[in-house]
């Protein structure tokens, strides 16, 4: 499907990989490597349109701790939660390190609390600031 074939209601799929950005009209992520961990900042809305591929991207970064910064995430539905759960399960099962969450806003925190994932939330470390 070419760019001319896309209707406004069908945004292009997100692309992931490497140290950089993945962009979808309402979602993006950035990765920073800091010593023995990776800080992955999610921006925008993590939903069915943007969650595809996120698990694989987070697992590819593993090998140490993956810190998922949720401070710029404005919305997350069950697809986003599922992507985080799949990534964490694969990282732990493979002995690849740990995946933790940090700095969720009120809406995202509530979604995590409802499904019992608020135990994954840790405090932000000043060592992770740019």
Image (cartoon, grey):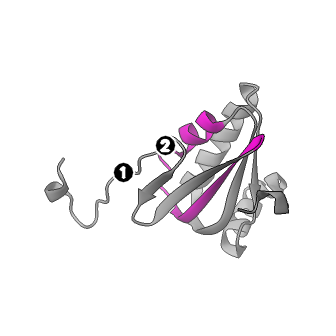
Q: Are marks 1 and 2 in contact (CB under 8 Å)?
A: yes
Toward which corner of the image does residue 105 lie, by quadrant?
Answer: bottom right
Can residue 85 be seen in the rendering of this structure?
yes
Residue shown at 67% from the left, 62% from the top: 70
Disc 1: which residue: 13
Quarter of the rendering occupied by the C terminus:
bottom right
- Badge 2 crowding class, 10 Å Cα cut-off, few under 14, some 14 to 19, many 20 or more, is some
Identify the mark at residue 63; answer none if there is no mark. Answer: none
Residue 41: say if magenta: yes
Disc 2: which residue: 53
Horizontal placement of 61 versus 120: left or right? left
Residue shown at 17% from the left, 50% from the top: 2
Secondary element at tag 2: loop
* Image location (x, y in percent) of residue 17: 49, 41
Nearest to the observer: residue 127 or residue 2: 127
- Badge 1 crowding class, 10 Å Cα cut-off, few under 14, some 14 to 19, many 20 or more, is some
Rounded to the nearest angstrom, the CA distance separating label 1 from label 2 is: 9 Å
* Image location (x, y in percent) of residue 3: 19, 55
Range of residues picked out in magenta: 35-61
Can residue 124 be seen in the rendering of this structure?
no
Outermost residue on the bottom side: it is 106
Residue shown at 72% from the left, 74% from the top: 106
* Image location (x, y in percent) of residue 101: 74, 55
Q: Examine the rendered structure and indicate whether residue 92 appears above or below residue 128.
A: above
User: Which of the two discs, 1 and 2, labels the residue nearer the N terminus?
Assistant: 1
Secondary element at tag 1: loop
Q: Examine the rendered structure and indicate whether residue 103 appears above or below residue 3.
A: below
Toward which corner of the image does residue 88 lie, by quadrant?
Answer: top right
Toward which corner of the image does residue 121 lie, by quadrant?
Answer: bottom right
């Amino acid at each position: 499907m070419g760019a001319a074939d896309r209707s406004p209601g069908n945004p292009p799929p997100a692309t992931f990989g490497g140290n950089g950005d993945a962009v979808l009209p309402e979602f993006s992520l950035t990765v920073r490597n800091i010593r023995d961990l990776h800080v992955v900042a999610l921006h925008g809305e993590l939903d069915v349109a943007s969650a595809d591929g996120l698990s694989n991207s987070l697992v590819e970064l593993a090998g140490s701790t993956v810190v998922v910064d949720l401070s710029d995430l404005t919305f997350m539905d069950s697809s986003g939660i599922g992507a985080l759960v799949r990534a964490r399960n694969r990282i732990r099962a493979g002995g690849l390190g740990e995946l933790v969450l940090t700095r969720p806003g009120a809406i995202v925190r509530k979604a995590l609390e409802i499904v019992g994932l608020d135990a994954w939330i840790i405090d932000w470390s000043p060592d992770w600031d740019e």
